[in-house]
Image (tube, grey):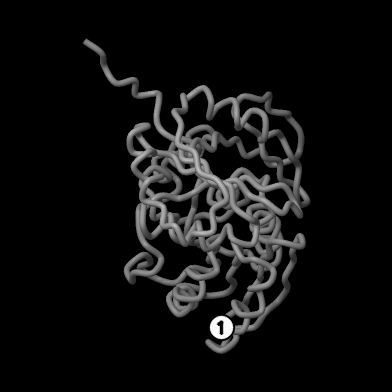
Amino acid sequence: MTTENKNNGGRLNLLVATQDAEPVCEWVREALGKEPVEVTQPYAEESRLEIYFDTLLEAKIAKKALPAELPIQAAEAKEYKEQDWTTFWQHHFQTMELGKNLRIIPEWEDVPEDERTNIIINPGLSFGTGGHFTTRFCLEALEEAIQVLKPQTMIDAGTGSGILSIAAIKLGIPKVDAFDYDPVCVDQCNGNAARNGVDGTINFFQADVLEPGWYAEPSDIVCANILTSVLLEAAPLIKRATKKRMLLSGIREIEADAVADTFIQLGCREISRDGDGQWCGLVIDV
């Protein structure tokens, strides 16, 4: 008799043109209920999307469900092992310093002892290591906002690995609420908080940013590193949840004006923006 190996699963690999990555990701989220991992080199013409499932059979079924009109160049369903995921992150995720005083460290690397604020992360299947521009932007904008505004409260919408919330607590914000649509992320966040010695100090929970009820009262800062389409739809809720400043990312550079204009029409003002040629982040004050 065989037993299922809980450390194995299925992965659907999709190769797409970089400009088609976002519509394909949207279909995956809506049709499969999964958050794809986008593996793209800067300025590359092609992107690889990875979608993870509990079993290889689920990955094969998802492959068969791909619509013919979806702009996919190649698709492959294969088994992955837990060690494959670990090896991926150990290759792609390394210690990095950013901002004035932040350092992001994979949990498998040694932690330096100096004046920098260390944030120890095991990303698991969650998004948010500081390696992607959108996460770096939010971390650096958060560090600056803390210095300038002295916020006492923060909401982290679409928290992923919990990296922004953990940084907020370690940089001095006393009260942080953080949520994600994916319950796997919430479990991973609690683990990362424990790795940083701040377990129990952040309220991690599952919620949908598009549905009212994810905040009891407005916070000084709201971080939302989520997709442009979601930011646009959730803009009124995000604005009402913010007392002072919004840090918005997950935005393609060509979409930045549309996001900024949406919040300006709600009575906000753009403070700054930054981008890397592909992705962009916005600092918006209410």
50 and 124: which is toward the camera: 50
Q: Position of residue 36 (x, y in %)?
A: 49, 49
> Is residue 231 among what the camera can see?
yes
Residue 181 placement: quadrant: bottom left
Q: Position of residue 249 (x, y in %)?
A: 61, 63
Q: Is residue 35 left or right of residue 103?
A: left
**Secondary structure beneath disc 1?**
helix
Q: Is residue 13 left or right of residue 63?
A: right
- The residue lying at 57 percent from left, 80 percent from top is 286
The quadrant of the picture occupied by the N terminus is top left
- The residue lying at 37 percent from left, 32 percent from top is 56
- The residue lying at 59 percent from left, 72 percent from top is 245
8 lies above or below 235: above
93 and 245: which is toward the camera: 93
Residue at numbered disc 1: 262
> Is residue 179 among what the camera can see?
no
Q: Position of residue 255 (x, y in %)?
A: 63, 73
- The residue lying at 41 percent from left, 65 percent from top is 209
Q: Is residue 205 left or right of residue 112?
A: left
216 and 42: which is toward the camera: 42
Q: Position of residue 116 (x, y in %)?
A: 74, 40
